[in-house]
Amino acid sequence: MSMPSSEARAVVGLVVMPGDGIGPEIAAATLKVLDAVERRMQLGLALDEVPVGLEALRRHGTTLPDASFAAAERADGVILGPVSHNEYPPVAEGGLNPSGEMRRRLDLFANIRPARSRAGFPPRCGKAVDLVIVRENTEGFYADRSMFLGLGEIMPTPDLALSLRKITRAGSTRIAEAAFRLAARRRKKVTAVHKANVLRVSDGLFLDCVREVGARYPSVAYEERIIDAMAALLVRDAGMFDVIVTTNMFGDILSDEASEIAGSLGLAASLNAGAAHGVAQAQHGSAPDIAGRDLANPSSLIGSAAMLLAWLGERRNDDRLIAAAALIERVLDTVIARPEWRTADLGGPLGTKAFAQRIVDTVGEFTDANA
Ligand code: ATP
């Protein structure tokens, strides 16, 4: 494909929201890597950092300032660090969950969560893993997403708490379409995960929608698994799955399991995507137990940023952005293959900063020969 010259190439405006816990550390590492990719490839990346989370609460009285959200909405893509929303005050006191708010307000309905074993680092159990969980992101059991007004959790009496789970035909159909489209470009298999034996109405509707979409993809094999059996099957051999499509909370839980089986939560990249916006976000939370200690593995957010570049590249028909994403992935593989270059979660000696520097150096000197 012919590409415009670098002078004519539009700038790719990315907004970075570092977040809480290990967020600032892994965001800084990701920025260093993107800088190195920019130096090597001159993609026209322009990075702008805006506050969210506890720092934003201290400075602006809210964990998601309007100006930060507006910057994200205007950007070509967003890199969002993990947030400690469990520690936030109530919404009335400024404690909005930036992750949930972004997913809802930007209509980021598909959370694409790959779990892939890295070269030279065997999976924790079973055979090599290369699967993608396609998780519905805007409804389900999430109390901040399932209602037009108010929250999806109510307490009619001090001794009775109720949670509402929202499943819609439109939401289920569009996530199923994302899953089948992806599977058609991969190993052509979709597994729908549900609990329709108990949640007959809501997961019944979800499955009806997935089957209807699946009928339009005859070349893609289709199967259904109940969530509890699926949790066990992943441990037995996650290698038998290609694309897994499921509702919001099942997808959240299964993807942590799949990523840990593939190596570590520290490797777990993800992209939140809608029709108009893409937000790179690690699968894991803010890991307060290791925050501020230079212990976090930034591969998760670096890999998420690569997914964002690939997503943008496909939307813009820009092969260079797709090549940049592939470069980052191959560099991650190359570095993680060396035990002496790994972070502590993978049994290695490197801290977050030294690992990021290793990735930066490898981006600078990478050739197919040293892969
Ligand atoms: P939160 O409440 O924000 O979800 P959490 O600690 O309960 O935080 P995670 O952040 O998902 O949940 O972390 C679960 C475990 O995985 C923690 O023990 C954490 O140290 C580890 N972990 C998560 N992310 C990383 C990472 N990038 N590198 C290394 N270890 C990680």
Image (tube, rainbow, N blue to C red):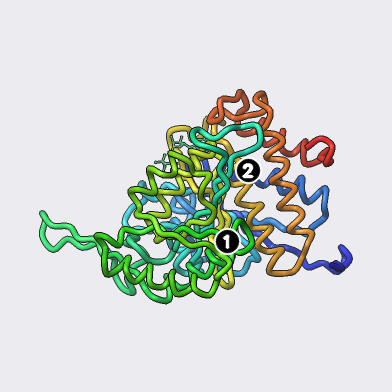
Q: Earlier in the sequence, mark 2 or mark 1?
A: 2
Residue at the spot 42% in from the left edge and 52% down from the top edge: 252
- How far across and how far down the image is residue 206, in percent? 37, 68
In the image, what residue type sits under mark 1? Ala
Mark 2 closeness class: few <14, some 14–19, many ≥20 residues within 10 Å: many
Residue 137 falls in image quadrant: bottom left
Whether residue 75 sits left or right of residue 133 in the image: it is: right
Q: Where is ligand 1, by quadrant?
A: top left
- How far across and how far down the image is residue 256, in percent? 45, 45
SS assignment at label 2: helix
- How far across and how far down the image is residue 86, in percent? 35, 48
Whether residue 148 sits left or right of residue 19 in the image: it is: left
Front of the two marks 2 and 1: 1
- Image quadrant occupied by the N terminus: bottom right
Q: Which residue bears the numbered disc 2?
A: 28
In the image, what residue type sits under mark 2? Ala
Q: Relative to residue 224, is residue 241 depicted above or below?
A: above
Mark 1 closeness class: few <14, some 14–19, many ≥20 residues within 10 Å: many
Residue at the spot 50% in from the left edge and 64% down from the top edge: 110
- How far across and how far down the image is residue 355, in percent? 66, 33
Residue at the spot 41% in from the left edge and 73% down from the top edge: 209
Q: Which residue bears the numbered disc 1?
A: 183
How many badges with numbers are in the image?
2
Q: Please tell me which residue lies in front, 261 or 234.
A: 234
Q: Give me the C-alpha separation between circle 2 and circle 1.
A: 33 Å
SS assignment at label 1: helix
Is the residue marked 1 within 8 Å of ligand 1, measured from its CB? no
